Image: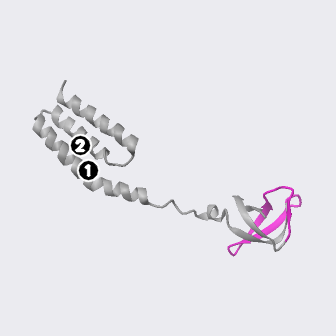
Amino acid sequence: MDAWVIWILVAVAFGIGEMLTTTFVLAPFSVGALVAAFIAAIGGGAVGSWVAFILVSVLTLWVVRPIARAHMRTPPQLRTGTAALVGRRAIVLERIANDEGVGCVRIDGEVWTARSYDDDSVIEAGTPVQVIEIRGATALVSE
C-alpha cells in the first residue's frame, strides 16, 4: 500500500475522532496527515511526510485551536428588535378585548397595540401583563 494512502486513512481516522469528541484536538492532526499525504504523493519520502505532518499539526493546533475555543466560549447572541420584547412585563393602558379589537400596553416606555393571548380573556387597564409573542405590530399578552 502506498504511503499517501496510509496518510489519507490516518487523516480520516483523526477526522472521525474529532467528530466524536468535538474538542478540536484531533482536527489539526487530520490536517497534518492530509498535508503529509500530499507530500508522500509527490514523492517527498517518509522523512518529508513526517516532518510535514508534525509541522502542520503543531502549527494548526497552535494557531487555530485558540480561535475555535474562543468561539465556543462566546455567549449566545443577544435578542434584539421585537424578539427582545418577548417575556417582558407590560402595563395595560387601554382595556384589552379581542372580540372588540381594542387594547394597548406600555412595554419599556413604548405603546403597543395589544391583544390577549387567550381569545376569551378581557384584561382591564392598569393590569400588569407579560408579553408572550409579537405578531407584526401587535403584542400578544397574558396575565
Q: Kindly indicate whether the residue at mark 2 contacts the one at mark 1 (C-beta within 8 angstroms).
A: yes
Residue 19, image x, y percentages: 39, 41
Apparent side of residue 9 relative to residue 39 in the rendered image (left or right):
right
Q: Is residue 6 above or below residue 58?
A: above
Q: Which element carries disc 1, helix, strand or loop? A: helix
Q: Quadrant of residue 49?
A: top left
Residue 54, image x, y percentages: 18, 45
Quadrant the C terminus occupies: bottom right
Mark linked to residue 83: none
Which residue in the protein does label 2 denote? Answer: 32
Furthest residue toward top: 1
Seen at 23% across and 43% down, the residue is 32
Furthest residue toward right: 100
Q: Quadrant of residue 79?
A: bottom right
Q: Quadrant of residue 50?
A: top left
Q: Is residue 19 above or below residue 117?
A: above
Q: Earlier in the sequence, mark 1 or mark 2?
A: 2
Q: Which residues are magenta?
A: 98-124
Amino acid type, residue under disc 1 in the picture: Thr
Mark linked to residue 60: 1
Residue 83 located within the stretch drawn in magenta: no
